[in-house]
Image: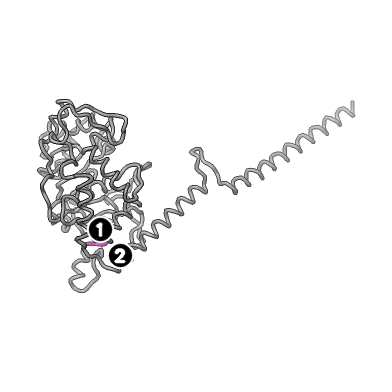
Amino acid sequence: MLWHRALYKLLRCAGLCFFIAGMVLASFYITFQYRKKGFRSPHGTTQRDTATAMCQSCREEDAVRRRVLQLEARGWERREESYQKLRSGLSRDCRGTSEAVMTQENTPLGSKVIYDGEKHRHIEIDQKIFSTFPQESPVGNVTFASCAVIGNGGILLDSGCGEEIDRADFVVRCNLPPVDGRYYSDVGNKTDLVTANPSILLEKFAALSERRRPFADCVSRYGVGTMLALPAFSYGRNTPLSLRALYTLQDFGTPARPVFLNPRYLGSLAKFWRARGLRALRLSTGLMVTSLALELCSSVRLYGFWPFNRGPDGSPLRHHYYDDQRSLTSVHAMPAEFSQLLGLHGQGVLRIQLRKCQREQGEERGGQPDTN
């Protein structure tokens, strides 16, 4: 019996040794794989992937910042030939003055409209929808001397650009931004066209399925005659939501003019910029309205366009001038879009404001130009 007990103890000891050895080997293997490939998350990305992406983003940001400094050192000069060339291309390929918004002229009753974000899906324009369209384009046959397109970037905060923005003949804003007294000195309040993405209606106004007055009050702050542009035909889910927005403004007597962006125009814009090297699942609202402004206006100036969380001088910035909320997911290629716009700035087609507007006064006294 004693030898049975001795054998049993020996086997237990051997088993424990094998277990410990296995754990040690497994630990070494995992460590080796981690170092070789990086830790892989449930989403299929590794820490090395993440680090590489962050590194690439840093390099991209540094490259843009160097480019900005070079452009500032060179000085900005309008180049009429470059401007006319791009404007002619947009007018020929996209026809924003007649096609940017849905009208009874460009979309007759009974038309089949393909959603630009869902190419397999279409909607037939019935009388109910047709009656919401203006007879003709509200921006057709008009050329404005100067236009200001306002992005919502944190770079606008403390810029002092409000008065300069309000001096423009036509002012475009994106996604229902606040223009009240807190921000007036930086962003002004004049608004001729403002866009509203469905995400704003869903998140801020509960899809207009509950109390609707807050939405009507929000839009009314932009003033009489302001156009509210809605992407009603980008995705199927946008159509009923955009119609609710239009009916809400009508029910509360809001003086704004709701219009629906034309999916044919948005598709043409995507093709236009893709041919110029821009790869993005969808164009941002900022690039869309900038493209329209280039057709409508003799002179275009951009404010609040900067895609990074640090300014040109390296100082930290909020995501928006009014909050620091960042989208968890994005189908836009903001740095790539900004590079395109910066290229147009360098070509003298448009001008991007990246410094405080008060510096213009300094320029008259011999100081540095504001954006160059």
Residue 82 picture location, percent across and down = 23, 59
Q: Which residues are magenta?
A: 352-357
- Image spot of residue 188 (x, y percent): 17, 53
Residue type at the position of mark 2: Leu
Q: Dividing the image into 4 quarters, which one contains the C terminus?
A: bottom left
Cα distance, mark 2 to mark 1? 11 Å
Image quadrant occupied by the N terminus:
top right
- Earlier in the chain: of badge 2 and badge 1, it is 2
Are the two marked residues, 2 and 1, in contact with CB atoms closer than 8 angstroms? no
Main SS type for the magenta part?
A: loop
Crowdedness of circle 1 by 10 Å Cα count: few (<14), some, many (20+)?
many
Please check the rendered image and state whether residue 355 is part of the magenta-colored stretch, yes or no: yes
Q: How was the colour assigned to the protein in this rendering? A: one colour
Q: Residue 239's quadrant in the figure?
A: top left
Quarter-wise, where is residue 59 in the image?
A: bottom left
Secondary structure beneath dot 1 equals: strand
Q: Residues within 10 Å of mark 2 (few under 14, many from 20)?
A: some
At which x and y percent is residue 63?
39, 60
Q: Residue at x 36, y 54 (%)?
A: 309
Name the mark on residue 352: 1
| Residue 229 rendering spot, x and y as whole percentages | 19, 40
Which residue appears at 20% of the width and 66% of the height? 360
Q: Which residue is mark 2?
A: 71
